[in-house]
Image: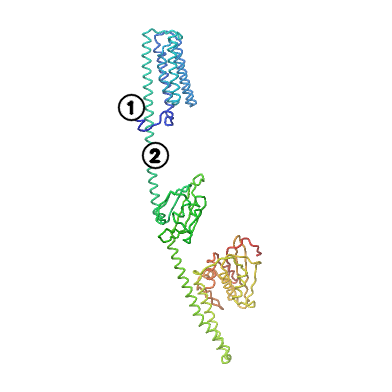
Amino acid sequence: MRTIVSKIVKKTKTPLPGSPVFEEHRGPVFYLVTLVFALIAAIQTFVMQGPVPGMTEARWGGVAALLFFAVIAGGYRLTGRLKAASIVLLAVTYAASIYSALKQGGAPAPTLSYAPFLPIVATVLLGRAAGVISVGVSIAAIVFCTYAAQSGLATPSPHNPEELRILLASASVLLAIGVTTYALTYENLILNATRETIKAKNELEEKAAALEESRNFLSAVMDATHDAVIAADASGKLSIFNRAARKIHGIDAQPMDSQEWPSTYSLYEADGKTQLTFDKVPLFCAIHGQKVSGRQMAVAVPDRDIRYMVANATPLYDSKKKLIGAVATMRDVTTERQQEEEIRNQNREIDKFARVASLDLQAPLNRIIMTSEALANSPEIRASARTRTDLAAVASAAKKMGGLIKDVLYMSRLPIGEISLQPVAVRDCIEAAIDLTGVSEADCRLDFRFAGSPEVMADPQCLTHVFRNLIENAWKHAKPDVRAHAEFTCVVENDAVTLGVKDNGRGMTQEQIDALFVPLERIRTDAEEDSGLGLAICRESLTRMGGEFWVESEPGAGCHFRMRLPLARPKAALAS
């Protein structure tokens, strides 16, 4: 049996008594030991001392021991304090066995039935140190009882030599039973611990296999991602470096200090010429708690084409808000950048062609206008009213055609033109627009309904063009026989400015408003027929500048064209 136990312990490396593996078994072992001790005491008291008549002192000691065993078991049951109960159990057992031995002539038999067994019990219940102490106490008890029997300190034994031999034999049998019981119990403990260890080992292996499978799955997902994904722990050690990252940098993750990342992985500024400093690397910034979004950069590996990237990085925190690392992604935008450059080149060519075409178209129109006006003022034509009217109509149509060409050219250039946002004084743009329209005060009354000149973030040319269109719109669509009137409004709301041009025209229905901003959709009146481009240009211009454009109107109540733009200097002092 010892060989089997040794093999099991060696194979499984099961912890010995005193380790946490045995904690849940110590309670049952305590009850078992107490029961065995009580049985031994009962056998010695009522069976082995059977030939002795009456209640001897040894028998009284046995009865007292039985009572103590019952009290100790009950106390442990109530309090659950195993250590204290075990110490009391051992102390009572030693005291009862020594007392019983002294009252039987110092015969060591009663003591021998307990003494070798108690160190084993102490080891199981209290640990190795208690077992060593118990060995010393057992040896001392046996020596003391033997000395007491030889020196006459013990009570004369009531047994004859034959009874003593029987008593010794019985004690040996009891000792064998106790040791065997302990061995079986101990073996059972080890087997239970072994099974638990094997179970725990199997569970650990299953979890390890599941973790490895999960890691392989994550790695496959990362490798299937087109963007480069790179992650590092809080110390800067790279833990994820997917296939796209390896392809971009031409190497795998390398163990190194984060200060060497720019040179090792060929990280550059967006110009592709200036190498990044380590503290500007997105992953480094994220490891130090900074979130990076849309960072333009380049990877310039020697002997390879420069690749342009857009990088994002974010810190990673655990459930306790502790920084545990960071993850960064890089998207290759080289192709998009090349396509954008090609589009810009094509747009420049289109813009150049549009300018040339505009000049080529404007030249004959200007000639028609000049010729018509010259003919209308000639003596031969001046006498004919109908001819003058026809020539005036020709000149007017040519001027409208010229304006339409300008609008078409401006509209076509809006999506491709460069927008330069800068602080712009609203009043300056309105006054410039008034000068460009050439509208006189007699034709259209112009009123400012705000003080000061707030600055908005806009393109000055675009904003001036918007106001020019709105002023001309108020003049063209005035009610018959009513002087046109345009009011300029301005309201500051939070960090934005709402500007407006309010006229006294005919107003519009909701159906007309819905069609108002569609290019070439014309709103017809008895007096004018609009090209349909002016208001569409206004909305497109405001959209390009990051603003909004809308109209508020009712039939017969005029129109209030409004636009909202960001305020260049928040909370400017204005009076509305």
Lower position in the chain sequence, tag 2 or tag 1: 1
Q: Is residue 476 above or below residue 326?
A: below
Residue 159 place in picture, x, y as percent = 40, 8
Q: Is residue 188 above or below residue 255?
A: above
Q: Amino acid at mark 1?
A: Thr
Task: Quarter of the image for the N terminus: give it.
Answer: top left
**Residue depicted at 48% across the width and 62% down the height:** 271
Near-viewer residue (43 or 301): 301
Near-viewer residue (528 or 41): 41
The answer to the question of whether label 2 and label 1 lie on touching residues, with beta carbons closer than 8 A, is no
Residue 348 place in picture, x, y as percent = 47, 71
Residue 109 place in picture, x, y as percent = 40, 14
Q: How many numbered circles are shown?
A: 2
Secondary structure of the residue carrying tag 1 is helix
Q: Amino acid at mark 2?
A: Leu
Counting other residues with Cα less than 10 Å from the Cα at mark 1, is it few (<14), some (14-19), or many (20 or more)?
A: few
Near-viewer residue (234 or 54): 234
Residue at the far bottom: name it.
Answer: 380
Residue 510 place in picture, x, y as percent = 54, 68
Counting other residues with Cα less than 10 Å from the Cα at mark 2, is it few (<14), some (14-19), or many (20 or more)?
A: few
Please state if 275 lies on the left or on the right of 220 as rendered. right
Between disc 2 and disc 1, the foreground one is 1
Q: Is residue 38 above or below residue 422?
A: above
Task: Quarter of the image for the C terminus: give it.
Answer: bottom right
Near-viewer residue (102 or 549): 102
Reading the image, the residue beneath label 2 is 204
**Residue depicted at 40% across the width and 47% down the height:** 215
Q: Is residue 332 above or below residue 361?
A: above
Secondary structure of the residue carrying tag 2 is helix
Reading the image, the residue beneath label 1 is 3
Q: Quadrant of residue 36?
A: top left
For the residues labelled 2 and 1, the Cα–Cα distance comes to: 28 Å
